[in-house]
Image (spheres, rainbow, N blue to C red):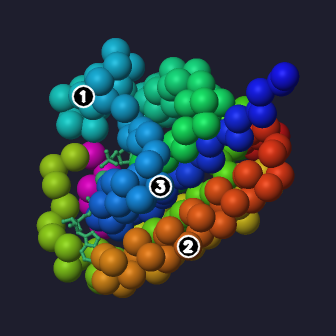
Amino acid sequence: LGAAKKVRGALIVIEGLDRAGKSTQVSRIAQSITAKTIKFPERTTPIGKMIDSYLGKMSEMDDHAIHLLFSANRWEKVDEILRSLDDGQHVICDRYAFSGIAYSCAKGLSHDWCRSPDVGLPLPDLTLFLSLTPEVAAQRGAYGEERYEVVAIQEKVKTILSQLGSETNVGPWQTIDAGQDIDKVTEDCLAEVKKAIDSVQLKGAPIGKLFT
Ligand code: ADP
Ligand code: 2DT
Ligand code: MG
């Protein structure tokens, strides 16, 4: 008697600017659908510690070098992501390769160059882009002290990030109005997440590869 094949979990990505409500929604969605969560950058690994030091302005680094470290920080979690999905567990990522491209492009690196180290990462079954106007973001408090937490960079990042959903082979992409009441944002996110999970279960397709 062959055991029924276990359906894989869904890979969900939450993207958006600083203070869009990503971490809030990631934890709410994870609780609702019982998922594993991964935050990028994952600051506790040796690579993550270098990134943390850079973001905290304790160290300087060439723009290309730090870009590659952010990407390597995703690649070092791929095995764990794939094993969880295989095991039937859903995985939700707080930021992913799209943040990688947007922040480095905002500094002037070429789009093609920025994209290449992330080619082949697990393809999200859904990316939720939490979209917020700078005015509403400003009402959520002052920026912190970290690198990139300045209006000029955030504006550029917003423009680039909001265009990434129309690129090829990024997987399903939904923009969510993150300026709404917290519960309404969660409701909108969960509606999309449930559709994505149903689609994964219906198709039974293996996880894809980003940008390929
Ligand atoms: P991010 O992870 O995108 O930087 P957070 O989830 O940390 O954002 O939220 C940033 C701040 O905004 C927190 O103080 C949080 O409580 C608040 N916040 C999150 N979502 C909303 C919302 N929909 N309306 C008002 N405030 C919110
Ligand atoms: P938070 O920890 O507050 O989310 O901020 N970043 C992130 C990049 O420049 N490249 C990347 O690949 C990723 C994942 C965005 C982390 C900061 O790091 C930036 C803000
Ligand atoms: Mg956060």
* Residue 53 tag number: 1
For label 1, being within 8 Å of ligand 2 is answered no
**Circle 1: element type:** helix
| Quadrant of image for the N terminus | top right
Q: Are marks 1 and 3 in contact (CB under 8 Å)?
A: no
Taking the image as shown, residue 195 lies to the left or right of residue 160, namely right
Q: At which x and y percent is residue 41?
A: 39, 36
Residue in the foreground of this view, choosing between 209 and 63: 209
Is 4 located above or below residue 17 in the figure? above
- Separation of residues labelled 2 and 3 (CA atoms): 11 Å
Between residue 199 and residue 61, name the one nearer to us: 199
Q: Which residue is drawn at 78% across and 51% down?
A: 169
Rendering quarter of residue 199: bottom right
Which mark is first along the chain, 3 or 1?
3
Magenta highlight range: 147-151
- Residue 204 position, x and y percent, is 81, 45
| Residue assigned mark 2 | 191
Look at label 3 and name its amino acid: Ile
- Residue under label 3: 33
Q: Does the magenta stretch include residue 148?
A: yes
Residue 37, visible in the rendered structure = yes
Amino acid type of the residue that numbered disc 1 sits on in the rendered structure: Ser
Q: Is residue 96 visible to the viewer in this orientation of the structure?
A: no
Whether residue 58 is in magenta: the answer is no
Q: Which amino acid does label 2 sit on?
A: Ala
Give me the residue at 16% from left, 50% from top: 145
Mark 2 CB near ligand 1 (8 Å cut): no
Residue at screen point 21% across, 37% down:
56
